[in-house]
Amino acid sequence: MDPQILGKKYDKIAQWWNDRHMNSSYGVEQFEKAVSYASEGGTALDVGCGAGGRFVRILQSKGYKITGLDVSKEMVRLASLNHPQDNFIHQDICKWETSEKFDFIVAWDSIFHLPLDMHKPVITKLCQLLDDDGVFIYTFGDGTGGGTSQWRGDSFYHSTIGIAENIQILLDNGLSLMHLELDQYPETHVYAVAKKR
């Protein structure tokens, strides 16, 4: 799916998303596990940050300076209102470039919206943006291929390259796998935590 189209779809539900996830516990246990492998403080990148909320607050409590990235202009506007001390950017991770390195990177439920052929380059990019001893947590699907599903009255594209290929990309980029779990079984939702050595 074209990131601009995806961004507009999320623009339509941004306020609903903000209201639902601002104080949600969804993913918090998994996120706190990832944070436990990281040093306190430093810089963090949130890919597909949405309107901010629970993950940003956890990172703030650990002393991180946060950069958030999202394809939805409305999500970025809400995140900037919710967390004015941090930096939120309306941008497509496939095209976004930076010379900055990060101590912590999260891509929770965002990479699976990418075109199938962009998974490897984007995950590789995120691995390379990670500083030494940095921690990376992200989610993906247990399977391969792509398709669309109906959600919130609209169609959304999802794709995945599967567990084995995701792990191989991490290893090829010098990361060690710290944790891997199908955390919503029997759903095919997977989260991985890796650390750069």
Image (cartoon, rainbow, N blue to C red):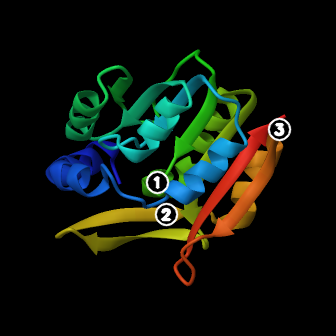
Look at 54% across and 47% down and name the residue there: 118
Q: Nearer the viewer, residue 73 or 77?
A: 77
Q: Quadrant of residue 161?
A: bottom right
* Between marks 1 and 3 in the image, the one whose residue lies nearer the viewer: 3
Give the class, few, some or many, for how many residues have Cα within 10 Å of label 1's Cα (few <14, many ≥20): some
> Looking at the image, is 44 positioned above or below residue 147?
above
Look at 41% across and 43% down and name the residue there: 48
Q: Nearer the viewer, residue 76 or 98?
A: 76
| Residue for badge 3 | 174
| Residue for badge 1 | 115
Query: What's the distance in space between the residues labelled 2 and 3, CA to CA?
Result: 25 Å
Look at 50% across and 32% down and name the residue there: 61
Give the class, few, some or many, for how many residues have Cα within 10 Å of label 2's Cα (few <14, many ≥20): many
Q: Does label 1 or label 3 sit earlier along the sequence?
A: 1
| Residue for badge 2 | 159
Q: Tell me residue 66's x, y (percent).
A: 47, 26
